[in-house]
Amino acid sequence: MALLEVKNLGISFGGLRAVDEVNLNIEKGQLYGLIGPNGAGKTTLFNLLTGVYQPTNGTIMLDGVNIVGKNTYEINLAGIGRTFQNIRLFKNMTVLDNVKVALTNREKYSLFSGILRFPLYFKKEKIMNDIARDILAVFNLEQEEDTLASNLPYGKQRKLEIARALATNPKLLLLDEPAAGMNPNETAELMDTIRLIRDKFNITILLIEHDMKLVAGICEEIFVLNFGTELAKGTPEVVLNDPAVITAYLGA
Amino acid sequence: MKLVVNVIEQLINGLGAGSIYALIALGYSMVYGIAKMINFAHGDIIMVGAYALYVFVVLLNLPVVAAVILTIGLCAILGITVERIAYKPLRKAPPLAVLITAIGVSFFLQNAALLIFKSNPIPFKSIVNVNTIKIGSISIRGITAVILVVTFVSMILLTLFINKTKAGRAMRAVSEDKGAAQLMGINVNRTISMTFAIGSALAAIAGILFISQYQSLNPFMGGLPGIKAFVAAVLGGIGSVPGAMLGGVLLGIIESISKAYISSELSDAIVFGVLILVLLLKPSGLLGKNRIEKV
Amino acid sequence: MSTNKQTKLSSNKKAISKTWIVIFKIVLIIAIYVIISSLVRFDILNRQYKALLVPIGVNIILAVSLNVVTGFLGELSLGHAGFMSIGAFTGALFTLNMDMPGTLEFIIAILLGGTIAAIFGFFIGVPALRLRGDYLAIVTLAFGEIIKAIIKFLNLPSGKDAAGNVKMVKGTMGLSGIETYADYTWVYVALVIVIVICANLIKSRHGRIITSIRDNYLAAESIGIHVSRYKILAFVIAAFFAGVAGVISGHNVPIIKPNDYDYNKSIDILVFVVLGGMGSIKGSIIAATVLTVLPEILRPIKDYRMLMYAILLIAMMLFNNSKFRAGLNENKSLAKLTGLLKFGR
């Protein structure tokens, strides 16, 4: 059974079909790329998958359960984590707290344990610190755990956002342009990290990217969206040599 | 039949009170639209207008027309001055900083009036001397009729100004997008000053009508009508000119009807309750624009 | 590996210094109490300043609790006095109509007032789920005024008369004959508890969630946070403590009136929070203390004092956001000197 199965997914804003008749099959443990020209509906598709928008039609099955109609937070609990195109960190919180707050559903204690400082509070806080530091170490952010998120340089902010999403222990991780604004070196490093977390945390990744070369470099399978509908899918070689894809990108 | 007459009279009373709220609400709404701030001191402009009129008419014995014009002019200048001194330096500050400053201005105006005129209410004989008008068996108080006419004329003039003049278009442009308006060669500072002037002038008119109806002045008289007008502006959709008019009139009518038929003590609770209900159903007010956040 | 060891070492050091900080804080809390009580015992404070002790404590509780909603959750509330009012009237009704030993009666009144206020906090938290910013502000203001109007409208049982019949009083008249249980010891204990709870809350899982919602509610949802639940939680906690403050302030004077708790009071509390610094508990404490004492300090200039207060308020806001101030910020030692004036982050 596929991890994520999307059927006939669509949404309209007024008269505009932003996403129309999209079908996706995502298998466990794979790394997928979602590409398409500007305005193709890539981010809208992410917003549909995470419940930020409710689809006009279609179904989204995660591990065999329909998640359409669920709230964003419920979908995260069901196993989808994500990052945002325009970085959305908790800017006035430290790097460590940004990750710890994402561990909140994994390591729980009651309100009273927290305000009265029961032993459980100290125990759980320690566990959270340890997990959070482990995750930060993967992204080379462990030295900056006390920095406010807003004071991080841009590239590290992108990484912290991925770290935060990972901390929720998702089955499927959606990355919205993780390399946007990075220089080629940073991008190459990030791609290594993405491969690494896929293996280390044993998760499935779907990422939006503009740079086709980059997507081709790390993704096992690519979906191409254009005008809200599926234009092509398959292995990088197949997709990038597809005349329809080339036309869409070059706008011929 | 008697009940119908009574209801109609109450509706007209409500319309009168609502007109005053609407005049004040316009100031809140226009300033919010253009400067994105709640001008908490706006209600106190009514009070300043009322005292100014008292000084001109009673203490200086000026003719009524001159006193009214001077009062409106004085409040307009006060509005501009307050904006220049207290709000302009805070254009880039967090909204809460501006809100607290406006609260400070409100305290300042109230306590300045308290210092000059003392806390005892000053009786004031209405400058409006119009007899009660009878239409069939319905009677309308002279002052209410005057309020309705003055408000109606003010609103028509304001609408014409906003829609037909260059300055009015500049105002709309600045409230849509300050940066873009500036790039198009609009003098943003002057437009903001003008908005404060117009808002304060309308508040002055409201103040004049208000004391002509209630015939008594005190330094804190602007507080409650100010808050209610603010509620009216939010009810109609803050930032929207027709919304402020609609909100004010509705609020006046609801208040008057609940005072007459439910309980005068509960009328405030009912007015505020309606506001909460409307906002729950329509979070941006009756005629307000819904802004969707882009994800 | 070596970096791992280093972090462990440094975290050990941190833990040790943390213990010292806790000890220091406990000593500080006791020291302040000793100072205040000796000032009172040895009649060093004059009557006016003594009368300010309870209001200062009440205002600190109010400011710290409002900071939970406005500073940490990031929602503007102009109805905090409404919760205070509920606490004050609930508490006073309880002590007026009960016949228990004073201390017990007052403790129950405090908890009851807080609880009833918290229940209302829940209901005002619900609109907060749909509304934001200025719209929520006006709804909270409306809520406070509704509470005031309803209390005025009700007939309240205000103890028994000589014949043993329950006296009913119109709410507009307020309640009178309340036992003035609240003294500086009561308010000091209460404010220490409230501050400790709020400070612990902020550094706990729930507090982190509340701050994350302020910073970015959508991102908070995306990591599995039930945003609505925690928004309401923040409102309930803040309302509970405002209710507690209400009970205490209601037992500081024998008479309370609904008009004592109108939107002007809410605005006063908001001013404490904003001037003290949004999200700074320390700032709230200092601002509430200074601004409660300030009118008394300005007393020699009599009629001009409220005018001066207004001018100071405007001047402080202008100064905080001026270029001069931004320059000071770059020099950190100077920034510390102007700690009270700290605004936002």
Image (tube, coloured by chain):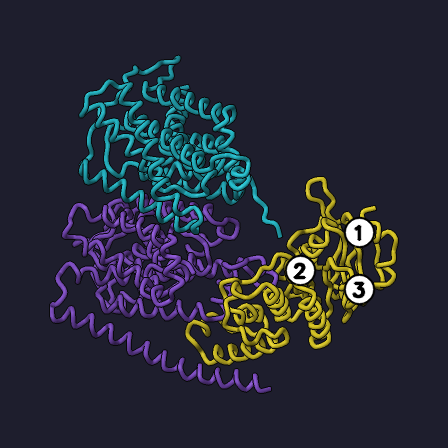
Chain colours: A yellow, B cyan, C purple
Q: Residue at x 28, y 74 (%)?
A: C29
Quadrant (top left, top right, bottom left, bottom right) of the N terminus of chain B: top left
Crowd class of label 3 (few under 14; some 14 to 19; many from 20; radius 10 Å) = some
Give whichever of discs 2 and 3 has the lower sequence position.
2
> SS of the residue at dot 3?
helix
Say which mark, if any, is on residue A216. Answer: 3
Residue B124 placement: quadrant: top left
The Cα–Cα distance between marks 3 and 1, rounded to whole angstroms, is 15 Å
| Residue A114, horizontal then vertical, whole percent | 46, 73
| Residue B182, horizontal then vertical, whole percent | 51, 38
> SS of the residue at dot 2?
loop
Q: Image check: B104 left or right of C143? A: left
- Which chain contains the residue that carries disc 3? A
Crowd class of label 1 (few under 14; some 14 to 19; many from 20; radius 10 Å) = some
The Cα–Cα distance between marks 2 and 3, rounded to whole angstroms, is 16 Å
Between C30 and B171, the one lying in front of the other is B171
- Which chain contains the residue that carries disc 1? A
Which residue is disc 1 drawn over?
A249
Between B225 and C178, the one lying in front of the other is B225
Which residue is disc 2 drawn over?
A180
Between B207 and C144, the one lying in front of the other is B207
Q: Residue at x 23, y 42 (%)?
A: B111
Q: Image check: C60 left or right of B238? A: left
